[in-house]
Amino acid sequence: MSSKDIYEEVRNSRDFTGKVVLVTGSSGGIGEQTVKLFSALGASVVVTGRRAEGVKRVAKEAQELSPQKLKPLEVVADLAKDADVERVFNETVIINTSNPRI
């Protein structure tokens, strides 16, 4: 069974439509799989990570899994840095306050 099949299988188990999910470290590993799952469940997702290429790749794959094809918010940041933590928070809140569907 491919990973895309797994997301299709769980798609109808829960509905996160209208919810925003921020997953830190989502440009790879467990964070990547978590953000893809929430996207498949209808959430607007925020993909974060230190590597721009990983963030971009995961965001594209998450959008393909989204039932509404919602474009994830992409934020390249190192959350060990206070300024980056503040920026991730501000970008997530500002974007989702003005356009909750990202």
Image: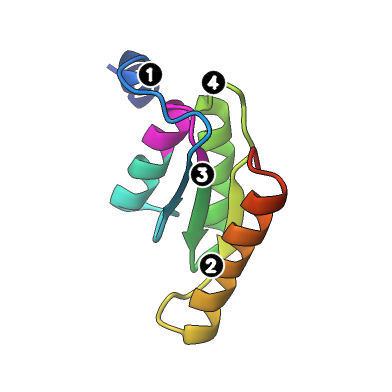
Q: Earlier in the sequence, mark 1 or mark 2?
A: 1
Instruction: Provide the residue designation for mark 3.
Output: 45
* Residue 85 relative to residue 31: left or right: right
Instruction: Provide the residue designation for mark 1.
Output: 11
The amino acid type found where label 4 is placed reads Pro
Q: Return the residue nearer the eye: 16 or 31.
A: 16
Q: Describe the element under mark 4 as helix, strand or loop.
A: loop
Instruction: Provide the residue designation for mark 2.
Output: 89
Indicate the position of residue 83 as horizontal and vertical percent values.
54, 84
Which mark lies nearer to you, 2 or 4? 2
Q: Is residue 100 above or below residue 88?
A: above
Residue at screen point 64% across, 38% down: 101
Q: Return the residue nearer the eye: 36 or 93.
A: 93
Instruction: Provide the residue designation for mark 4.
Output: 67
The amino acid type found where label 1 is placed reads Arg
Residue at screen point 34% across, 26% down: 3
Q: CA distance from mark 3 to mark 1?
A: 15 Å
Q: Describe the element under mark 3 as helix, strand or loop.
A: strand
